[in-house]
Image (cartoon, rainbow, N blue to C red):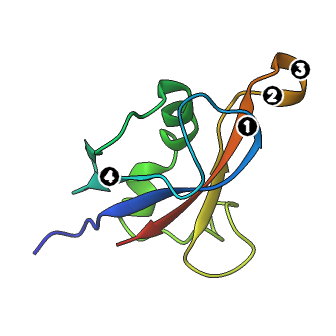
Amino acid sequence: MSDKSSLIVRVEQIKGHCPVYRVGDSFRVVDGFKLTCTAPVCLHSLASLMPYYVALSRGVSPVELGLAREGEVAYLQCLDPCQLTGGGTVIFEVKPE
């Protein structure tokens, strides 16, 4: 049995305009390191996920990581400061599958 779970990364909210994602889009991180998706994934958004996906896949609490106030759902956002670039800042929820 693996000590790693799959994660679902879902677009919760978009501030501004994102040319890649729409609210509700999602992708998965399987077995702690494999990215699976059926739609485009923005590399900028992966930069926000990179520091946390291993810990979250291994069951470390999002609260302990400072990514939530309570519960098992983590919240992250992409690095695009939409108010300065005219782009879109995407907020993701990340939860175990």
Real-space CA distance between mark 2 and mark 4, rounded to the nearest whole angstrom: 25 Å
Q: Check whether the beta carbons of the residues at disc 2 and disc 4 lie within 8 A of each other.
A: no
Q: Secondary structure at mark 1?
A: strand
For residue 89, which numbered disc appears in the image?
1
Report the residue at 60% width, 54% height from top: 23
Crowdedness near tag 2: few (<14), some (14–19) or many (≥20) residues, C-alpha within 10 Å: some
Q: Pointer 2: what residue?
A: 81
In this view of the protein, which residue sits in the foreground, 89 or 33?
89
Report the residue at 32% width, 52% height from top: 29
Q: Pointer 4: what residue?
A: 29
Which one is earlier in the sequence, the residue at label 4 or at label 3? 4
Q: Check whether the beta carbons of the residues at disc 2 and disc 3 lie within 8 A of each other.
A: yes
Q: Nearer the viewer, mark 4 or mark 1?
A: 1
Q: Pointer 3: what residue?
A: 84
Which one is earlier in the sequence, the residue at label 2 or at label 1? 2
In the image, what residue type sits under mark 3? Leu
Crowdedness near tag 4: few (<14), some (14–19) or many (≥20) residues, C-alpha within 10 Å: many
Report the residue at 43% width, 50% height from top: 53
Real-space CA distance between mark 2 and mark 1, rounded to the nearest whole angstrom: 6 Å
